Image (cartoon, rainbow, N blue to C red):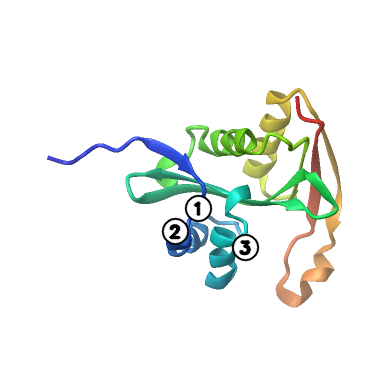
Amino acid sequence: MQEQHSLEFRCPTLEDSPQLFSLVVRSKPLDVNSRYVYMLVASHFRQTSIVATVGEKVVGFVSGYKLPESPQTLFVWQVAVDESMRGQGLAVRMIEQLLKQLPAISWIHTTITPSNTPSKRLFERVATLHNAALEQEMGFEGTLFGEDGHEAEMLYTIGPLH
């Protein structure tokens, strides 16, 4: 008989970092960073990041950090959801849970490529849930990424959060 596990939210741990890396690899079009970066996220930025788990399996992940010059602003770096959990609102739930853990956050920043429609919809939904404005401007020009043909990253600003 297989044991059923419910969805849980918590801060990532260093032991989660291999699963974080693997989840991002499977989550196109996210940029895959080195395994070391996910170790840093799960240790140095664990309080401003969140994982969703079912049993021991990480099925969702949001990495973020407070901007050093604006500690009331959370920069959401990556959002990844396992294919088995997509279409269930998990990304919104993770961001909402993260905001509950960080009550002093008034603003969210993130960057999104113009072709990443699911991410745009996610952050539009977050803005709507908080009755907050969503503004968009150039974040990083594509040329900054060198010869790899990376799209520009648009900076989305959501806030103030209500």
State the residue at coordinates (48%, 62%). Answer: 14
Instruction: Please indicate whether residue 34 sits to the left or right of residue 85 in the image.
Output: right
Instruction: Classify the position of the N terminus by image quarter.
Output: top left
Q: Position of residue 112 (x, y in %)?
A: 72, 50
Instruction: Please indicate whether residue 148 sits to the left or right of residue 136 in the image.
Output: left
Q: Observer-nearest residue: 69 or 7?
A: 69
The residue that mark 3 highlights is 31
Vertical order, 149 against 30 (above or below): below
Query: What label does residue 12 carry, if any?
Result: 1
Marks 1 and 3, Cα distance to the nearest angstrom? Answer: 19 Å
Instruction: Classify the position of the C terminus by image quarter.
Output: top right
Query: What label does residue 16 carry, if any?
Result: 2
Viewer-nearest of labels 1 and 3?
A: 1
State the residue at coordinates (65%, 43%). Answer: 119
Q: Position of residue 62 (x, y in %)?
A: 58, 48
Q: Observer-nearest residue: 148 or 9?
A: 9
Marks 2 and 1, Cα distance to the nearest angstrom? Answer: 6 Å
Label 2 amino acid? Asp
Label 3 amino acid? Asp
Residue 81 shows in the view? no
State the SS at label 2.
helix
State the SS at label 3.
loop
